[in-house]
Each structure stands twice: as C-alpha cells, then as structure tokens.
Image: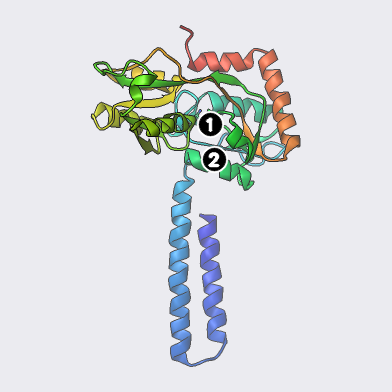
Amino acid sequence: MKKQVLALALAALMVGSLSACGGSTAETTAAATEAATTQAETTKAEAEKEETTAGEVSTEAPGEAAGGVLTMATNAEFPPYEFHDGGEIVGIDVEIAEAIAEKLGMTLEIEDIAFDSIIPEVDSGKADIGLAGMTVSEDRLKNVDFSEPYTTASQVIIVKNESDIAGPDDLAGKYIGVQLGTTGDIYASDYEEEGSTIERYSKGFEAVQAMMQGKIDAVVIDLEPAKVFVSENEGIKILDEALTVEEYAIAVKKGNTELVEKLNGALAELKDSGELQAIIDKYISAE
Ligand code: GLN
C-alpha cells in the first residue's frame, strides 16, 4: 500500500513538473496524460505485486527483535513442511525458521512464492533464506550455499489404486506429473528418453488432482507431502520403492558464510536440545 501512495505522489510530481516546462498546452496535456497512464500502469503493477506478496506473514510485531528481519522465501504448498492453515502459513520449516530467528534475535518474515523462484530470490538478496523442503543438489550449489541438512527425504511415486504401475520401471512411456523445478521434476525428466511425457504443475497437489482425474498416470513427489495428499484423498496410494535419497537444507546467498555459520549454530542447538525432532514429530507421526 505504501508503495502505491508513493507512486501516486511521484506521478503528481511528474505532472506538476511537466506543466511547469511551458510547451504548448496541447503538448503538456498529452505528456501529462501519458504520465498519468504510465502511472496507472505502475499502480496496477504495484497492486499486482502486492497481491503476489500477500502471503507475507510477520510472526512478530515489526521492530520487536533487535537483530533485524530474517526473510524466508518458501512455497507454502508443501505439507507438512509449509502449507496454509486458515490465514496462516505453518509447518515444519516455518517452525524451524521461527526457532532459528528467535535464537538469532531476529524477526521472521515469510514470503510465499513459486518454488522455482526461491533460489533467484535468495540469489538476488531479496530473501535471506530459502526454506522449502529444498533438497541440496550439485546444480543448486552453483547458485546458492546451503546450511547443514536438517532432515532426509526421498522421492516416491503416487498412483491410483488400480494402476498397472508398480515401480519406477513402469514409468516408461507414461504421463508423469511433477511440481515444476523440483527434484521430482529432475528425476522424472530422465524418463522422457523412454517415451514418457512430463506434466509440470506449479503445485504438487495440482499434479495429484490431475492424476485423480485421469489426465496423467503417476506423480513423482517427496514422500512426506505424498503421505499427506494420499491420506486426504480416496483411491490413490504411494508405491513402496523410494526413488532417491535426499537431504533438505536452508539455502543462503552464495558467499554469505556469516549467515550459514549462524544458521548452522542455531540448527546444532536445535538438534542437541531435541527441539528440532519435536518440531518434526509434531507434524509427522512415526510409523
Ligand atoms: N525436495 C524437492 C526439491 O527440493 C521438492 C521441494 C518442494 O516442492 N517444496 O526440489
């Protein structure tokens, strides 16, 4: 909102200075109209921007923490790590970030964006950390640094109960749904050589829905969200065989060793105190 007010004030200034330039009235008016139009566009763009960042949630009153703000970029479509619950973004990653921020004396702010925008957001410095069930990979390490891992994960296959797909070999030639830009996407993409078609969705659950509607044959996604989606929907199951072994860690701008060290210090404390396990146990029941 503040940005819009500022943009309006700027437009007023522009129109004012244009009229002050002299010129013919017609010219001035045209220029002023143009400025006003540009302004309208700017305001619209700002409004849209406001909309896309509407997921921002501050967990504390601004200025409460002396250590400043810790901005976390995430994609809150990944239960139980980050998801919407009523008007709030909650989950394992959110609680880990809150606990870390508290230890660092910082205020946590959450930015809910597309999963494949998280690394660019961290890389550009707009967000301090990327915390989104994000797997450490060689490729990602080219663009960001990672903290120590805080948990392990794997990719699994979800199919309809009556599916003839019983394991990864059966994915050949099939329609496979994934979340865009994830390790599931990377894994499944190898099957393109075997005649499979990869359908990429912005949310993992959209892939699951497409499968339930019969548009695709299988979904490759991380185990824990898979468990949530399967428990909330009839007629679908997770195949036993895990496809990968992965580690989730916190992404930080490349070269920001100071922050990585702070995060690792806080994570080590959370591990030692049992707090990290308690957060995980709150969302994932042991089998
Ligand atoms: N662990 C997967 C990855 O890093 C998926 C993460 C996600 O969808 N939030 O790509």
Percent coordinates x, y for residue 37 in the rendering: 43, 72
Left or right: where does residue 47 sit relative to residue 61?
Answer: left
51 lies above or below 3:
above
Question: Which residue was labeled with disc 1?
Answer: 132
Label 2: which secondary element? helix
Q: Out of 178 and 87, give the one closest to the viewer.
A: 178
CB under 8 Å between discs 2 and 1: yes
Q: Amino acid at mark 2?
A: Ile
Q: Of the residues under marks 2 and 1, which one precedes in the sequence?
A: 2
Label 1: which secondary element? loop
Residue 262: in sight, yes or no?
yes
Percent coordinates x, y for residue 192 in the rendering: 38, 34
Q: Amino acid at mark 1?
A: Ala
Give me the C-alpha separation between circle 2 and circle 1.
Answer: 8 Å
Label drawn at residue 3: none
Question: Which residue was labeled with disc 2?
Answer: 118
Colour style of the rendered protein structure: rainbow
Quarter location, residue 65: top right
Q: Is mark 1 within 8 Å of ligand 1?
A: yes
Q: Residue at x 34, y 30 (%)?
A: 176
Q: Residue at x 36, y 17 (%)?
A: 167
Numbered label tally: 2
Q: Residue at x 57, y 41 (%)?
A: 119
Q: Out of 84 and 221, give the one closest to the viewer.
A: 221
